[in-house]
Amino acid sequence: MSVELKFSRANRIYRPSEPLEGKIVVKTHSSISHYGIRVTVKGSVNLQVRGGSAGVVESFYGVIKPIPIVNWTIEVKPSGKIVSGTSEIPFSLNLRQQDENLERFYETFHGADISIQYLATVDISRGYLHKSLSATMEFIVESDKADLLQRPLSPEMVIFYITQDTQRHPLLPEIKSGGFRLTGKISTQCSLFDPINGELTVEASAVPIQTIDLQLFRVESILLGEKIVTETSLIQTTQIADGDVCRNLTLPIYVILPRLLTCPTTLAGPFSIEFKVAIVISFQSELSKLHKKSDPKTPRLWLAMETLPLELVRTK
């Protein structure tokens, strides 16, 4: 005996103004009686503060009370019987209920400290003598089309340059004295449907280059009392070049954004979700071989980097 939720869309992406549709699949070897079949939709912003990003007092609180977005139940079928075999029961419900939503619909996001999640749960009540049947499935919420930008977003390209003098952390003596210079441009505002575009050129470097990477970070901030606790974590690393690249050769930057790990830049009252990119140059060094696994947020003697803010938006 089993119950399963199947949504009408394979990608499980819905907008707040659209109906959430699907079917409840019940498989049983014999007919069963029930006291009603209900579907519950819950959406919330879940916040937590970890010890690494906060002090002792903040860590004591740990998980903060979730911010409810939507929470309501509909009855799909009244009391009755389900025949043996496989039964499919359709359901349809509107996500946005007038005067019922507790908070605006934020887009689905799974971060380190902030998680915005929407769940649909089916419950088949069978009374006190039998265990109820239930199943839960996550669906993904994206912004309504009416809330999206009308025109295509023209990417904002920012020109950058990286030298030994732009670094705020110490470098190896041979890198510092020999010098290096990288120039380029990169988009710092882009649509979630589009890649991060840009280009870079190694104009000079006395020490051979090992790799050039582009790192994507999320910056999650939570309001805790009168203090804002911020945690920066790495989402993904994309290699732009491998080895000591030719000088004055233009290298393209083309990075696809991960789906569930990114969302539109969100600045809400109790929390915010922002993003940034870092161009990281790793120079060939014996010291780097001894520290192959290191914190990407910690500058190293054999690394040079440039970090830029990245605004993500959803367009039509």
Image (cartoon, rainbow, N blue to C red):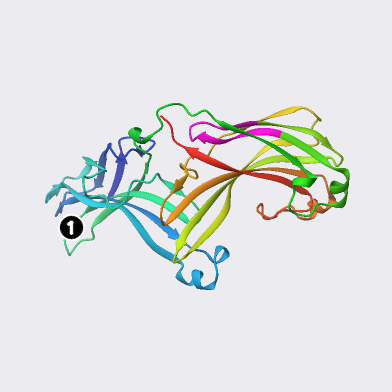
Find residue 251 and report its horizontal and vertical position in percent.
71, 29
Find residue 69 and report its horizontal and vertical position in percent.
32, 52
Seen in the picture, residue 133 relative to 153 is either above or below; the reply is below
Find residue 225 and report its horizontal and vertical position in percent.
44, 66
Is 193 included in the stretch rendered in magenta?
yes
Q: Main secondary structure of the magenta part?
A: strand
Seen in the picture, residue 279 relative to 290 is either above or below; the reply is above
Taking depth in this image into account, of 62 and 20 the one nearest to the observer is 62
Q: Residue at x 23, y 60 (%)?
A: 131
Q: Quadrant of the C terminus?
A: top left
Give the residue number, with chain letter if any, for mark 1: 126
Left or right? Give the position of 207 relative to 295.
right
Amino acid carrying mark 1 in the image? Arg
Q: Residue at x 46, y 37 (%)?
A: 313
Seen in the picture, residue 214 relative to 61 is either above or below; the reply is above
Residue 275 figure quarter = top right
- Can residue 89 be seen here? no
Taking depth in this image into account, of 121 and 277 the one nearest to the observer is 277
Q: Residue at x 46, y 26 (%)?
A: 152
Left or right? Give the position of 297 relative to 5.
right
Find residue 298 and report its horizontal and vertical position in percent.
69, 55
- Can residue 86 be seen here? yes
User: How many labels, in total?
Assistant: 1
Looking at the rendering, the stretch of residues picked out in magenta corresponds to 184-198
Is 197 included in the stretch rendered in magenta?
yes
For label 1, count other residues whose C-alpha is less than 10 Å away and answer few (under 14), some (14-19) or many (20+).
some
Q: Residue at x 41, y 64 (%)?
A: 64
Taking depth in this image into account, of 37 and 295 the one nearest to the observer is 295
Seen in the picture, residue 157 relative to 290 is either above or below; the reply is above
